[in-house]
Image (cartoon, rainbow, N blue to C red):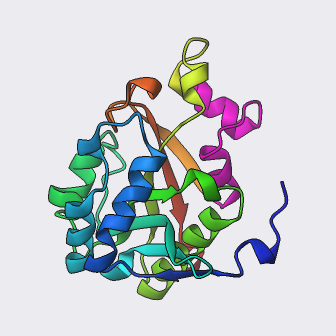
């Protein structure tokens, strides 16, 4: 489906504030109804992000309605690619941003969500572009994230997660999240096996990386 500029004409991005925390939680819960709420960004986590690293967050507001319709959060960190397995809690730390390191050389995307009623409008690309711009401005090595795999819920009885990732990368399967991330320049570096507690996808995720082209 093509996206026109009119789809995002009324949408602006802001950094999170404590006042937006409740609305951001509502988007999160609408996006991941099968996930353990303890794994999701609630009011506590959004408040902590606003206090710790607000510039690492991008919140989409539709000026036509005043609603928060998409969210993203992240921290600065270091990352050991020789030992990549981790959970979202291990990556993010207490309250979703406890592991923020002001000297970290990578941006770790701890959360991203577009409300189901507003998908297909190019908002996800807006959020990723904002993250990339921040990374370039800060001179970081790139973006790392654990990517949610909604399509794996239907495929897990046919293939293991590694095969599923290979299929999506090769274009043999479509995943509404990972396919979009690949189109936005991300690379798959492997599978994360206990990333988020969600029985629908057997707690699996992709380890995705966007290297900063300025440092190539």
Residue 52 in view in this figure: yes
Q: Is residue 144 left or right of residue 168?
A: left
Q: Which residues are magenta?
A: 163-185
Q: Taking 44 as reference, is 57 left or right?
A: right
In the displayed structure, 151 sits above or below 130; it is: above
Whether the magenta-drawn stretch holds residue 118 is answered as: no
**4 horizontally vs 9: left or right:** right
Q: Position of residue 154 (x, y in %)?
A: 60, 21
Question: Magenta residues: mostly which secondary structure?
Answer: helix
198 lies above or below 74: above
Estimate the x, y position of residue 30 in percent, counting from the top left: 45, 48
- Which is more toward the observer, 8 or 141? 8
The x and y percentages for residue 54 are 31, 80
Residue 176 is one of the magenta-drawn residues: yes
The quadrant where residue 87 appears: top left
Q: Which residue appears at 46% of the width and 73% of the height?
A: 59
Q: Residue at x 49, y 38 (%)?
A: 190
């Amino acid at each position: 489906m093509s996206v026109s500029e009119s789809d995002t004409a009324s949408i602006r991005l802001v950094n999170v504030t404590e006042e937006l925390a409740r609305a951001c939680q509502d988007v999160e819960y609408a996006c991941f109804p099968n996930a353990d709420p303890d794994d999701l960004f609630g009011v506590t986590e959004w408040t902590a992000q606003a206090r710790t690293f607000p510039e690492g967050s991008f919140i989409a507001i539709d000026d036509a309605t005043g609603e928060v319709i998409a969210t993203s959060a992240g921290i600065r960190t270091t990352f050991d690619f020789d030992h990549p397995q981790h959970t979202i809690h291990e990556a993010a730390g207490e309250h979703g941003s406890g592991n923020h390191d002001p000297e970290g050389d990578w941006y770790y995307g701890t959360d991203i969500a577009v409300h189901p009623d507003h998908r297909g409008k190019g908002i996800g690309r807006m959020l990723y572009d904002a993250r990339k711009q921040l990374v370039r401005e800060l001179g970081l090595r790139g973006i790392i994230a654990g990517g949610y795999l909604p399509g794996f819920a239907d495929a897990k009885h046919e293939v293991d997660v590694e095969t599923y990732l290979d299929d999506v990368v090769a274009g043999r399967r479509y995943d509404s999240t990972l396919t979009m991330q690949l189109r936005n320049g991300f690379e798959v570096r492997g599978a994360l096996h206990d990333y988020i507690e969600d029985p629908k996808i057997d707690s699996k995720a992709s380890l995705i990386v966007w290297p900063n082209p300025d440092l190539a």
